[in-house]
Every structure is written in structure tokens, then in C-alpha cells.
Amino acid sequence: MKIVNRNLLLSVASVVVLMGCESVQRPTDTSTIKRPTGVLGKAVNSPGDDFAAGYEHAERDSFLLFTSNNNGRETVYRVPLPSVASDDSVRAFSAPLHAMPPELARNTGTVASNGSTTVFAVSAAVQKELAGLLKTSGSVLGGSDIFVRTARETRNLEEINSAAWDAQPAVAARNGIEILVFSSDRMSDEGFSAPYDGVEHIRKDGTQVRGNADLWFCFRGPGEQRWSQPRNFRVVQNNDSVNTPSNEYSPFLYCIDGTPHLLFASNRNGNYDIYDAQLRLDLAARTIGIVSVQPMPSGDDAVNTEAREVFPFVPFPHRATQEQQLLFSSDRFTLRAPSDAAAVGAGGLDLYRVRTQMLCDVPDTTPRPKVIPRGTLQYVVRLIDGHTGMPTVIDGRMRTLVSGRNGIVPMETDSSVLTITLPPTDTTIGGDIVRFATVGGSAYATRPCTEREPIITAYARRMISDRIRNVSTLQRIVAYDTTVQGPAIPVRRTVRLYDTLAKDQPYVTKRGQLVDVTQDGRLRVGRDTVVTVDSLPPVTVVGKKRVEFYTDTTYHYDTTYISAAQINVPSLKTAGRELSVRWPQQDTVIYDTVVVYPVYEAAAPCMKVFATSDSVRNVPYFQTGFWEVNTSAGYKRHLDRLRKGDLDDASWIELNWRNQYWGSRTPGEVSPRLERRRFEYRKKAEIIDDNITTLVSRTSEMIKRFWRDNAGDPNAKMIISMMAYSDLRPIKVGRFKSDTTIRYIAASYDSVGQSFGIPQSVIIRPGASLVGTDNDTLSKLRAYFGYDAVHDVLQQDSLYAALRANGLVVVPTDALTPAEYLERVRSARVIVLAEGRKVDMTVKPQVRAYVGDDDDYYSLDAVRRVDIIVRRIDLRAPAYVIPECCR
């Protein structure tokens, strides 16, 4: 509050100190204290300054807004208007004003009568904090600036603010045209104002002015974003003055729709009083005139007293009347009886309410019935394909709710065009306003069967969302102007001094002296002398620079498609809110559109085969421990066993130093050929890692598609078959080197017979012989370890893990007997099979050794493998058939 922050604060402090020096006994019974007429109670008044009354209207109540700087901090409060009496029973509470921190709202003034504009002032706010808290646009120009708050933004009114003090705004509107009045001590050639109360300035024309604040005004028309250039009230003054060389503060616009008044406070007569300026307004022409300026009534219990009276306010609505209820702030209680004021919790400026007379002649605005011609209102909605823009949506549906004064009427259609015609005489809807809310969609839903190319399977709504990807703090250099007060300058001035002689003392007059006689007959002699005094020079404007921090935000946009199988896609004109239309005077057609996007899908692959001899698509085996998968982890584990000597006697293992092809005659020696072979194993291990990842990824995709389409069909199943092979070389020496017995149920699916083969119980104990011409035991071990390696990765898939947790997955190790396994297969939805297929005879090398040619034993590396097939089947007892869409 400018008045409190300027010299008047000193005067209040001095009065309080002087009054406190008296020996005044503070009453103990506050009920006996006589309060000034009109003073409000503790609902609004506090020991600090309470001022800047305002008004806010809620749905069920009206509130008095005011500012209090109790505890040295200005905060906006509000209290229901019926509760502001002097009974001290209600307390005010802090009021976030239009989503703004209450501590930042200063002297908010009057909310415009059209309800669309709120202006307020902020004093001594740091720009980056202001911008962060208020999310404002624009920069702070002076120590106090005026801001506007709308539903869309909070903006610094840079077009009217200055580098000086700009505050205490009031705003009103008539017929959409707004007028803004505020107080400012900017340097002005039009008026009397100049920065800093009492500071002397020399204008460009040589005239002298002392710092004071004037009232300024500006206009804004409908649809305009910026206000007109502010003008000083002195430009419209004749005989009666709003602005004077004194301070003019706290304007308030009263009865703007009738006989307009400008109420304000001024200290032109010594202390601050409230004045009433009756105005002549032509808002359409943006002109203003002053009819008269008069002080409000004076007296001990009137508006103006010997104390300060500031911040006038008349509660809304402003009706045609002669007598009004005026609210204002005064320190008369503290000035007259500081101890009594303190005893009842008052002090400084307090809020008062008195009745006074000001003409408010509001014209009669009673609505008169008008005969308005009406035309036919037609509303046409099209349902279109978002890819083609054509009305080709299959099984389209639309529904429109038409509402008016008489209720809501739903209208639906099964076609791509919905036309609603409302004739002028329509009484179903009624009223002058018709509202439409339209949604559309498609009931079409199908699944592709054998199509390899995508087809339309459904329709969806497209939703585009954004999220913050990155927020960077940046800085920039901002140039600004500021005022600087230079140091005091010694100035020589001529001062006349007087000496008074004793009565009847003779004196001889000298040149340059002035002699006169006092009333008691003594001589008084005056002489001029030169003295040196300190004088403050005018303030200067200096350009400076500062570092300003700001944030730069980048966003990530996602597009999501939501099923439109039901009617849930809003039309373009009714998305987010209803389309409100005033009934037209001529025949009118309104076009609207509902957009849905087709969903394209191809038939799901019902079988994937991971089985080739190129060691890329299947999961190949290179000999490590003969049976383990040569993944990177398996390769490392096998080498660790070799280094620890666990496999020293297993010369049939290729990577053993005693192997006949790769080893050495010297115990423990690693030959160059063995190093090369180990290198081959290590590189192939990386390929196998990728193969397993690819296999699991594609299998997971098939499971997700399978479950999406067939979750409700208990007879629909998915099989993951793993078949292990050995090459044609018979094993002459070898045994199972392990500490663990391998147990599982080996089974396979016969696609020709559409059934599961007879399962076998596989039990391989540590030390079991691998010798044989058909390599049966080795292929069974490879089937088990192949299943284990793949399943270890597959069970990390969330859907697979959920199905497994619910007992809908069966794996080779889930049953103890073949019969139990087959029983579990009937109830399972995902079936994992593992089977050793003995020897693959399709590859027969011509050279019986590793000699480096294409036809030698190197061609057997890809034979030692596991082939994997993932396929869909249906249980149609007793057969397990391939679905029709997969044939």
C-alpha cells in the first residue's frame, strides 16, 4: 500500500509514540470502550493497517475483500458481507484471489461488471519469482506494477506501467467497454505527478515540481487485448480538480452504469480526506469529463475527520438511489484513543462503514419483449473415415443430445449422416439457446482369418497426448532502465539574517542593511549572507543489464487409439463442451463432423518355425559339455569346469586339451588349434544369445495375439515344441558329467494325426553312458537343456508369467508321469514340449575329419541343434486340430 509505505507511515508512528507517553490506564473491560461510529469489528480490523476494501460474489454468498499488513506483510483476506459487524464474532480468512497467492495481490480494486477482468498491483516483486508463482507474461517495469488476470493468463500491463510507482487500480465496464483508473507518481508533462514523495525535480521547461502521485485513466474496447495510452486527469480538468500538486490515491469507480462517480483520497488540505468527483463519461467515444469535485461530509462521526481517510468503496450492486453505504479506511480510532483501539484489537488504519448520499441514477434496464424473427435451424453431422476423409465407416453409429429450455432430446442414427431440423415453431426444445452434444463410433468388429494383407477390423478414436521430455534452465541478458539519485551537491544560497537590538539602543545604518521596528519599539537589522547547503540533483535514468533465468521445455507427443466399438467419439465442434447456438433469424445450417480411424490387422501367424541348418533362426548347439547350450553364459561355465579339472578325463569334449582333434599330447597344454576352436565357440555364443532373444520376442508376440483373440475359449491352445538333434557320428566314449539327475516328460505333437505322441518319462542320472550309435541319450539331454535355456528367458515375459502363475501353462518338468502330463495338457492354454530326436542323417561329410574344407566335419556344427516350432491348435475332443484360419 503506497500510503502506508510513504511519509504517512512516519506520521502515524509519531502519533502512536506521543500518545503512548501519557499515563493512560488501559481499560480491563472492553465492553465499556466507546468505539467510533461505523468502525467494523475483528472480522476485518486488526492491530495493523486494514485497507483496500473490495467485493467478490460467490454462488450463495457475497464476500468483502480487503488487505491487511498486520505483522508487516500485506495479505488479502475475505469475510462474508453479513459478518462484518462490530460484534467481533467472525474472523477473516486468507483468500487466494483468482488462483493467485494472496500475499502478491495488492489493492485489487473492483472486478469489472462484465466479470471478465481483474486488475491488481504487485509491489517490489522479483521478476523470476513473480513469473514462477503467477505464471505471468511480461516483465516488471517499476517497484510496483499493475497486472491483469483473465481466465487465460496473468499479464503485466506493460502498455500502461512505467518505471515509477503504478498501483491501486480500479476497473469498471459498460456495454463491454472498460475504463481503468489508477494512481502513479511517474514524471508527467500533463499533470503534477513526479517520482518520490516530496523530492524536487526540474522539468525540461525549467519549472519545478515536487514528487507526488496523480490519478490516471485509460480505456479498452471489446476484443482488444491492450489498453489505450494512460492520460492524466489534469487534461480534462477545468475549475474542479481531481489532481493537484498533492497526492491523489485509492480511486474507486461508483455507479458506472448511471451517474458515474470517481471516489478517491487526497491530502490537498493537509491530511488525507475522501473526495467525490462526479464524472461525465462517453465510453463509446472514450472521453471523460468532470462535472464537480467535492470532499465527502466532515465531522467527528462523518466520512472525513481530523484523521486519515483513504480507500473508499461502495458494495455492489450499484442501484438507483440517493443514499449509499460507503466503506473506507481511517486511523481515527488510533489517533483519538490508541489504548482503547489496542484493547479491542484495532490499530492503524481500520475499516469503517457509514451511510452517505451520492446520486446514482441507473437507467431502467427492464427487458422488454421483442419480436425477433426466427429461421429454421438445421444441424448436420457426418461420420467419416479419418484416413480417407470419406463417409465410408462400416456399421457407423451417431447420437446427438439436443437441449434447450424444455429439456434434452436424444436423436440417433445408424448411417453416416445425421440431420436434425428444428423449425421456427419448434416447442420441443424451446428457448433462445439450443445446445448440441454429439458422439459417434462404429459397432464393426472382426478378426482376420487367412488374410496376409491388413484389413479393417475395427475403428478407433485418435488421442494425441504430450508429456514433458526435458526442462532446461537457460539464461539471457536483459537490458532495463532504472532511476539513480546522485549524491548531494553543495549549493551557495543567499540567506537574510536579522538581529534585534535592545530597546532604545542607538544604531547607525550601513549600506545593504534593512532596518525596521518591532511592535515593542526595538530596532531589527537585517543583512544578507551567503551559506552553503546540500541539494539533491534530479534523478537520472541509467541503462543497466541483468542476467535473467528462464526454462526451456521440450515435449514428447504420443498418439493413442481408443476403441470406438461403442459410441464414444465426440464431434469436432462438441469435443470438450456443448455447442451452444442462439436461434438464428434466418435459415441456418450448422455442419459438424465425427472422425474415427480404421484399425488394420493381418491374420495372426498361426505357426512360426525356428529350424534351419544355417544356425541363425534356430537355437544351434556347438559342443561345450556335449549337451549344454553354447550361450555366452554356458560357454563361460564350461571353460570354468575345464580350468578346475572337472572335465580332465572327458577327452570326447572338443574344448578339452586331450581332444583328438584339438588337443595336445602334453598334459594341460592348450594348442593353437584348440585356441582357434575356442574362439569359434565364443563368437558362435554371441549369435546364440541373439537367437534366443529373437525366438522369445516373436513367441511372446504370438502369445499376446493368441490371448487377445482367444482368452475366452478354453479349447484354444498354443504349443511350443523343442526338438533336439545330434549328428551322425556314433559316440564311442562318453558319459553324463553332472551332479544332478535330469527328469522330465518328453512329448511331441503330430500335426498329421492331430494328436500328441505317447509321452515318455526321461530320467538321466549322473555318470550315465552316452555311448551308442543313435545318440539317443545325448539328444534327450540337449532337448532338456535347450528347453531350460529358452524357458529361462521366456518366463520373464509378463503375460507368460501371469498365465503360468494361474496354472494355464504346462512344461516338461511339471508332471511326474506321462499320464499326468497328458491330463494337464487338456486344461492348459500354453504347452511347452521337449523331445530328443536322436540323429539327423541329412548331413554326411565326405571327409571324416576337421580339415578345413566345406565338406568336412565343420558342416556338422549346425546339425547339433534344437529346432523350435510355435503353433496354434484347438481341442476338439479327442483330437487336437489346427484352426480353420490357420490351414
Image (cartoon, helix red, strand yellow):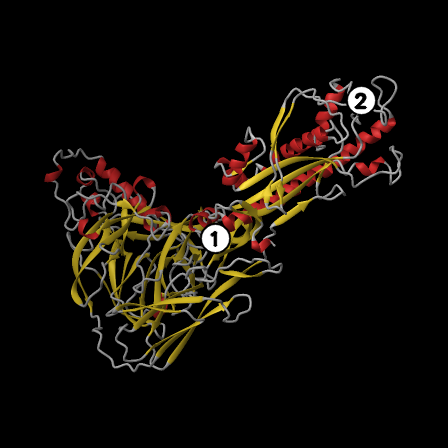
Q: Residues within 10 Å of mark 1 (few under 14, many from 20)?
A: some
| Residue position for label 1 | 539
Give the residue type at disc 2: Ser
* Tag 1 secondary structure: loop
* Left or right position of 771 against 329: right
| Residue position for label 2 | 651
Q: Position of residue 368 (x, y in %)?
A: 21, 77
Q: Nearer the viewer, residue 447 or 593?
A: 447
* Quarter location, residue 582: bottom left
User: Mark 2 touching mark 1, by CB under 8 A?
Assistant: no
Q: Position of residue 682 (x, y in %)?
A: 76, 32
* Left or right position of 876 against 635: left
Q: Position of residue 799 (x, y in %)?
A: 53, 42
* Tag 2 secondary structure: loop
* Quarter location, residue 728: top right
Q: Is residue 654 visible?
A: yes
Taking the spot 49% from the left edge, 64% from the top edge, the residue there is: 596
The quarter of the rendered structure image containing the C terminus is bottom right
Indicate which disc residue 57 carries: none
Q: Residues within 10 Å of mark 2 (few under 14, many from 20)?
A: some
